Amino acid sequence: MTFLDRASTSRRRRTWLAGLLTLLYPLAIYFGLEYSTPRVMALMLVTLAALRARVAGQPAWRLFAAAASVLALIAVVSGSGMPLKLYPVLVNAAMLGTFSWSLRHPPTVVERIARLQDPELPPAGVAYTRRVTVAWCVFFLVNGTLAALTATLASDRVWAVYNGGIAYLLMGAMFAGEWLIRRRAMAGQVAQATRVADDVRSG
């Protein structure tokens, strides 16, 4: 295995680890605050934010890590678990910022992902990926708002259930809905292309 292969493997492992820790974060904080202290759990927040920033490798995510560190510092100084519960709000804000920024400075995030499968993405595909990016911006805005409300107004259990379960189900529904719509749109394009080809042959 070459140095580049080892580096790529290491990066994939860090990416999977960051994703797994993010998924488990709400439950870890919920049980951690039950059996430990906010000061101890703040270390998890700093570690997770630093790992996400390293995996992303973008300046905006270093700013995200700095903001998460501020939340952890507030938790350490105040001894309150509230700042730790605001991390999902921060994640949604970072995702909203990333997706909305790409709308103003294309290609959009979704277009870049789509071009990994189809480098010659047609104009109709570009327009579609832009609409999907807008839809994700709305999702992150709504989800971030609900995360903030559960952190500030609901019990720790309700916060953990929403941010550690319901929010992921809603995200999965978004992915599944977009996939179904994309399949239907692609089928329509294929049918239209077939009709055009038939008309050309018959003409």
Image: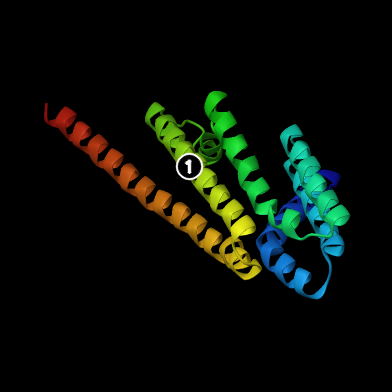
* Relative side of 34 to 183, left or right: right
Q: Is residue 69 left or right of residue 90?
A: right
Mark 1 residue crowding within 10 angstroms, few (<14) / some (14–19) / many (20+): some
Residue 5 visible in this rendered orientation of the protein: no
Q: Residue furthest top?
A: 105
In front: 12, or 199? 12
The residue most toward the left is 203
Q: Is residue 177 above or below residue 136?
A: below
Instruction: Tell me where residue 106 sits by quadrant.
Output: top right
Point 17% across, 35% down: residue: 198
Q: Which of these two is toward me, 155 or 163?
A: 155
Apparent side of residue 71 relative to residue 162 in the rendered image (left or right): right
Give coordinates of residue 111: x percent, y percent.
Answer: 51, 35
With respect to residue 48, does 124 lie above or below?
above
Q: Residue reaching furthest bottom?
A: 35
Observer-nearest of 149 and 165: 149
Q: Which of 71/96 is in front?
A: 71
- Residue at figure coordinates x 73%, y 42% from the top left: 56
The residue indicated by pointer 1 is 138
Q: Residue at x 34, y 43 (%)?
A: 186
In the rendered image, residue 23, in percent from the top left (x then y), is placed at: 66, 61
Q: Position of residue 52 (x, y in %)?
A: 75, 48
Q: Secondary structure at mark 1?
A: helix
Snapshot quadrant of residue 13 = bottom right
For this view, does 52 lie left or right of residue 141?
right
The residue depicted at 65 percent of the width and 41 percent of the height is 94
| Amino acid at circle 1 | Val
Q: Position of residue 103 (x, y in %)?
A: 52, 29
The C terminus sits in image quarter: top left
Residue 127 visible in the snapshot:
yes
